[in-house]
Image (tube, rainbow, N blue to C red):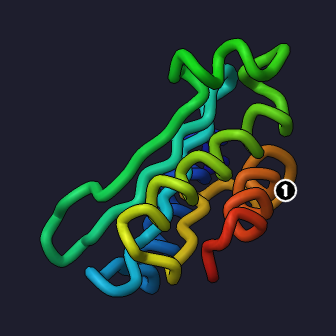
Amino acid sequence: MKLTRRESLKRRHQRIRKKVSGTSNCPRLAVFRSNQHIYAQIIDDIKQHTLAAASTLEPGLKEAAASSSSCEASSAVGKLVAERLIAKGIEQVVFDRGGNLYHGRVKALAEAAREAGLKF
């Protein structure tokens, strides 16, 4: 029985989440990628609390990139979420790619977050 793409993604995400967990000192940078947008959240799994978030749906980022489904837009989201977290005094995170391959838009977001000052 062959799995659909969505089922494969879900299985990979569950396998990653067994190993990756965020704490107050080192929260989890969770990435969700849809066909049109990309979302990033910084999550403290112990308190079950979102510390910061950013996405291509935000008004400032909508005008910045030509398309919200481009690597350019993903880089802008990575930079913005990193700035918001550094403003709260946290620099170390754990990266959760959400079952997606570390390639394309997910990779662009991660590299932009690293350039903005996050360590992972």
Using the image as rendered, state which of residue 102 and residue 112 is in the foreground.
112
Q: Is residue 53 left or right of residue 48?
A: right
42 up-or-down from 34: above or below: below
Which x, y percent locates residue 23? 29, 82
Identify which residue is drawn at 25% across, 72% down. 45
81 up-or-down from 91: above or below: above
108 up-or-down from 118: above or below: above
Identify which residue is drawn at 76% across, 25% down. 69
Other residues around mark 1 within 10 Å, as few (<14) / some (14–19) / many (≥20): few
Looking at the image, the residue that sits furthest to the left is 47
Which x, y percent locates residue 72? 84, 35
Q: Is residue 120 visible?
A: no
Which x, y percent locates residue 59? 54, 16
Residue type pointed to by label 1:
His
Q: Count every numbered label the image shows and give the total.
A: 1
Helix, strand or loop for disc 1: loop
Identify which residue is drawn at 61% across, 39% down. 33
Using the image as rendered, state which of residue 119 and residue 97 is in the foreground.
119
Which x, y percent locates residue 40? 51, 48
Q: Is residue 115 visible?
A: yes
Instruction: Please name the residue that numbered disc 1 is placed on.
Output: 103
Quadrant where the C terminus is found in the figure? bottom right
Identify which residue is drawn at 75% across, 21% down. 64
Using the image as rendered, state which of residue 119 and residue 84 is in the foreground.
84
Using the image as rendered, state which of residue 2 and residue 94 is in the foreground.
94
